[in-house]
Amino acid sequence: MPKNSGFEDTLPLRLFNRRHFLKAAGSAAVLPVVLRGHAAQSSGASANNRINLGVIGMGWQGTGNTQSFLPSEDCQVVAACDIDANHLKAALKMINDNYGNEDCKGYHDYRELLARDDIDAVMIAVPDHWHEIVSTEAARRKKDIYGEKPLAHTIAEQQSIVRAVQQNRIIWQMGSWQRSVPTFHKAAEIVRNGLIGTVTHVEVGLPGGNSDFDDVGKEALAKLAAQGVNAASLEQVVPGTKAWNLLVTDPPPELDYNTWIGPAKMEPYMRARSHKSWRWNYNTGAGELLDWIGHHCDIAHWGLDFDNSGPSEVEGSGELPPANAVWNTAPKYRFELKYPQGVTMTIAGGHPDIKGGVKWIGSEGWVWVDRGGFEASNPAWKQGKYLPRELRKVKLYTSSNHQQNFLDCVRTRQSTVTPVEVGHHSAIPGHLCLISMLTGKKIRWDAKEEKIVGDAEASKLTTREYRAPWKMS
Ligand SMILES: NC(=O)c1ccc[n+]([C@@H]2O[C@H](COP(=O)([O-])OP(=O)(O)OC[C@H]3O[C@@H](n4cnc5c(N)ncnc54)[C@H](O)[C@@H]3O)[C@@H](O)[C@H]2O)c1
């Protein structure tokens, strides 16, 4: 495990409070940022002192994020990067069609995009196993970052990103966009204002199953069936079998697969393990648990005022497929966590008694929220987008547009609604649950020191080996 102790001479990973942040950022905190842009020289649209934005990883979420940035008058997407030539081509077409010009430049290598001095900020939506390398390089290049959840593939990688963001004084917005949605804001404010009394327990309901995006699993099983090989699911297909051999193919010519695998362990190419479905193998992702922890645990922490805190004990289990299966992430899992102030939390996926979303249970009531759903012990709280002014003694940061909030903060140098430290703490419980499931042990966590206590085996899982030549920064 890389030494946490190395942090002592740097800034603590704890959440910057606003005063700390403003002090760190100096007088720039209240002045509009002077964009680096040489934009005025290159395009008419950029002459308006727009934020020059580069976008990296133009698959599913990268495309969605970029679509949200394109209408904004505050930014100009000047560069796009992907290692899949088809994804890059589609991205460039989308961006250039939007502006009615050919100015957005395409890149295969993110380092070339990041080396451009005229780029102020970047949106990064590469798969999780790439987050640390791309994000720390972007921070080193002083680019402000809109980065995707979960913050990274391991706790050590998350710590590395937090350090890079803090040292380089850049703005970070975590893609945990639920913080910019009024129902989640209202639910969290109800809890923070004590309207349900003292919180005793929280249920964080995540999806179960390994979702079959684009039917790649279905197609793989159909391919096997056509060859007379029956497999009930990709969680059952392991190396050395006919089924496995049939699923291994050459990578498609448009994909630079060696780079795509990047710092992860080299494995033979399979469509069902690449775009989007990388989530269902621990080599590159970590199942629904880590895919969703940065959404619902993030909201749970917001309501609890635990953005700068974490659990002390984590214990649970899941239905793990064989470790070498095509899809080896647990489709069903359940964990119990102990937090400060006597709060307990259940995090579960695939267990119908734990409803999707977040439910806080207090001494005087409860509130539950999910995408498109809101229920509470007091039906009056259902009224209105936000909590009524008179009940808002504690006012949470209000953002109604996650991408715009990032752009605003790039200009003002103030903290976004979801800064990097928040993303870090929101994902840590997911990593600890995973470690508990993989080791079969109760994990004791020192949230202040950010260390697993008294368990060398479990501690090893807070980091991983990088495949050469890639190195963790
Ligand atoms: N905030 C949300 O609601 C949300 C939703 C979905 C995904 N995500 C997150 O977004 C990230 C991407 O997920 P996705 O579903 O879009 O995956 P995806 O597989 O659809 O897209 C990833 C893209 O990154 C490209 N890529 C991979 N390595 C690269 C590299 N080194 N340089 C440049 N491009 C590279 C791939 O070719 C692909 O086009 C993940 O971290 C995921 O957790 C967030």
Image (cartoon, grey):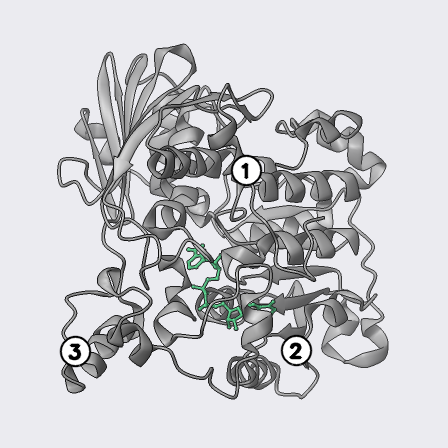
Where is 217 relative to 320, above or below?
below
Residue 292 pos. (x, y %): 37, 47
| Residue that numbered label 2 is attached to | 108
| Residue that numbered label 1 is attached to | 424
- Would you say the beta carbon of the disc 3 residue lies within 8 angstroms of ligand 1? no
Is tag 2's residue or tag 1's residue first in the polypeptide sequence? 2
Amino acid identity at mark 2: His
**Mark 3 Cα shell of 10 Å, populated few (<14), some (14-19), many (≥20):** some
| Quadrant where the image shows the N terminus | top right
**Of 303 and 89, the residue lying toward us:** 89
Quadrant in the picture for residue 327:
bottom left
Is tag 3's residue or tag 2's residue first in the polypeptide sequence? 2
Amino acid identity at mark 3: Val
Residue at left offset 78%, top offset 44%? 168
- Would you say the beta carbon of the disc 2 residue lies within 8 angstroms of ligand 1? yes
| Residue that numbered label 3 is attached to | 229
Is tag 1's residue or tag 3's residue first in the polypeptide sequence? 3
**Of 428 and 23, the residue lying toward us:** 428
**Of 469 and 138, the residue lying toward us:** 469
Where is 375 relative to 373, above or below?
above
Residue 133 in view here: yes
**Mark 1 Cα shell of 10 Å, populated few (<14), some (14-19), many (≥20):** many
What is the tally of numbered marks visible in this picture?
A: 3
Q: CA distance from mark 3 to mark 2?
A: 38 Å
Where is 133 relative to 225, above or below?
above
Residue 71 in view here: no
